[in-house]
Amino acid sequence: MGHTKFSLIMSTLGRSDEIIILLDSLLLQSYKNFELIIIDQNDDDRVEKIYNQYKERLDVHYYRCDRKGLSLGRNIGLEHVSGGIIAFPDDDCEYEADTLDKIAGFFEENSGYSFYTCNTKEKEINNAALETKKKDCDIGICNFLSVGISFTIFVRSEAIAGFLFDEQLGVGTAFGSAEESDLLLYLIKNKRKGKYHAAHYIYHPGKTETPQRVYSYSLGFGALFRKALLVYRMYPMFFIFLYRIARNITKLCLRPGDKIARALVTGRLSGFLKYKSLAKVKKIENNSH
């Protein structure tokens, strides 16, 4: 058993068979020093039944949450971690048998790095689930959006001791994505070093792009850039946003009938304009009483 313990936080809603695939992949891990923390946001007992099937075979902890929201669920999970490395597997991802072994080895050999990310693809076909970098690289402000999605991020617990996921961001909120990018931005802001590994994979099914889905995710993208200015005071992010949105608008002008391109542009602009920091939201709420 390895020296470093992993705490894997899985917040789940609406899935069951996919969870079994993840748990079976955890049973096969060559590295055994980990715990799984399940935050169940379902209104029924589908996940509790699965937990009961695995609780004698895995170090797994189960918590119910009546409120919905991915970031909320992960924050509840953070209250219960005991490991030195924290990760956030999706309820429909799958690890290779040596995933935790490779990551533990990276952290043991690279004490100067606080977080690790890797690549992702669909298991049955050689198709990336995210457009990512083709080579290993250190993670910074210019590339963090293309080198880390939530279930591929592993971070030392001390590096996020003061961090909470923004409960305005992520699935189940008004801004339907970018909670993991916010985590990476927080780490970069606090001068933590991270490394992306192009040849390491965690499996995840591909998603069909629809205008509604693209719009929801784009809202989170725009909100993240606004938060970078309001909260983190990372002003170069504004110019990165301008460059990206100008590129998106150019593509839309070339294809004015493309509903996906239109959803991307309108979602990103709307998210940027509508996002308010939590501190500002609380101030507005207090003034209204």
Image (cartoon, helix red, strand yellow):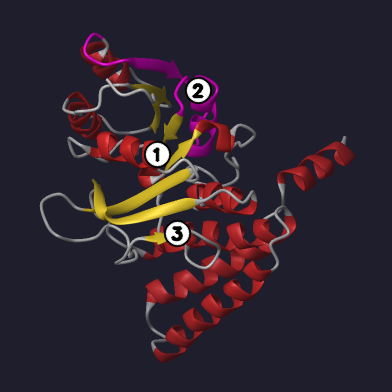
Residue shown at the point (33%, 65%) measured from the top left: 131
- Say whether residue 166 is magenta: no
Crowd tier of the residue under label 1, counting other residues whose Cα lies within 10 Å: few below 14, some 14–19, many 20 or above? some
- Say whether residue 71 is magenta: yes
Residue shown at the point (59%, 57%) measured from the top left: 224
281 in relation to 65, above or below: below
Q: Which mark is residue 138?
A: 3
What secondary structure is marked by label 1? helix
Mark closer to the chain start, 1 or 3: 1
What secondary structure is marked by label 3? strand
Residue that mark 2 sits on = 66
Residue that mark 1 sits on = 107
Crowd tier of the residue under label 2, counting other residues whose Cα lies within 10 Å: few below 14, some 14–19, many 20 or above? few
Q: Quadrant of the N terminus?
A: top left
111 in relation to 228, above or below: above
Amino acid type assigned to the residue bearing label 1 in the image: Phe
Circles 1 and 3, Cβ within 8 Å, touching? The answer is: no
Q: Quadrant of the C terminus?
A: top right
Q: Where is residue 91 shown, x and y percent of the image?
A: 31, 35
Q: Is residue 101 left or right of residue 275?
A: left
What secondary structure is marked by label 2? loop
Residue shown at the point (24%, 50%) measured from the top left: 201
Mark closer to the chain start, 2 or 1: 2
> Which one is nearer the viewer's eye here, 283 or 124?
124
State which region is magenta.
Answer: 56-84
Q: Where is residue 97 shown, x and y percent of the image?
A: 17, 35
Mark closer to the chain start, 3 or 2: 2
Question: Alpha carbon of mark 2 to alpha carbon of mark 1: how far?
Answer: 36 Å
Amino acid type assigned to the residue bearing label 2 in the image: Asp
Q: Is residue 174 visible?
A: no
Q: Where is residue 172 shown, x and y percent of the image?
A: 49, 42
